[in-house]
Amino acid sequence: MENRRSFFKYFISNRLALAGLIGVAIIIILGLFAPAIIEQPKGYGPDILLPPSINYPFGTDNLGLNILAEVIWGARTSLYVSAIAVGVAIIIGVPAGLISGYKKGFIGSIIDSIIDIFLTLPVLPLMIVIAAVVGSSITNVAIVIGIFSWPSLARVTRNSTLKISEMQFIEAAKCLGIPQYSIIFKHILLNVMGPVLVNITLVMATAVLSESGLSFLGLGDPTTWSWGTILKKAWDAGAVIDTPNPWWWWFWPSVFIVFYVVSFNILGTGINEILNPKINKK
């Protein structure tokens, strides 16, 4: 309880973490309550390529659809992709990191080698190939992103496990005859959650960048709204290179991509500062 109070105290006093949390909260609210905030864009509208105005704060696209609605519903898609990708990365990466960090023999070496191999792979080209093979549904894209996101999470978990497994309370647990699975997935897991939480925020950010990139390349789900899909439609229609161009069509989804990534990154940086004992002593 005291540790929780201390964490909350440092979190409130850390402007970076607080700013990141506010940004993440805005994205979550927009994503979760999108149906209550604005109607889902669909069909065609009479107001084509209108600049930002009172009626259309973000303007309209070449189909007359409200870009504000597209961006808000895109936040919903981004959260879904991030959640699936993080879930896949946690399921694979955390157990792999725990076992490779605790088991320092043959098993640990094999898992560590697999992690190293995945970390050296050209991620984006492989994502493109696999996404093209498995199909462009938003769930498939999210799973593909998660499969390539777990190695960094595993590496962080392994490094933390190596340090914690040498501590006296772990040696005491071994002497008491506590089963290895209980030591790994109970005692050690609880103590590595800090670094894992920081890395999860980074995975949330990179998942959206990856999804936006795949959607822009035409490998996203065309039946769902995402910021990458909006950018692709703007590019295909020549909105980016036309002179004069409807800048609002590509500008707002780009702003929200940057806002999403920066919010999760500074939240993770802030949490890392709070969990760093050297910073806490200052």
Image (spheres, rainbow, N blue to C red):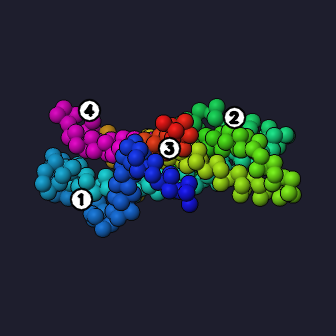
State the CA–CA distance, disc 3 to disc 2: 29 Å
Q: Please say whether residue 260 is one of the residues in the magenta stretch.
A: yes
Among numbered discs 4 and 3, the one appearing first in the sequence = 4
**Which residues are drawn in magenta?**
236-265
Name which residue type carries label 1: Tyr
Q: Residue at x 20, y 36 (%)?
A: 245
Picture coordinates of residue 156, whole percent (x, y):
63, 41
Q: Are marks 1 and 3 in contact (CB under 8 Å)?
A: no
What residue is pinned by disc 3? 274
How far apart are the two marked residues, 1 and 3, measured between alpha carbons? 49 Å
Tell me which numbered mark, 1 or 3, is placed earlier along the sequence: 1
Q: Is the N terminus in the top left, top right, bottom left or bottom right quadrant?
A: bottom right
Q: Which residue is mark 4?
A: 241
**Does the residue at mark 3 contact the one at mark 2 (Cβ under 8 Å)?**
no
Q: Give the label, 1 or 2, closer to the camera.
A: 2
Residue identifier under label 2: 116
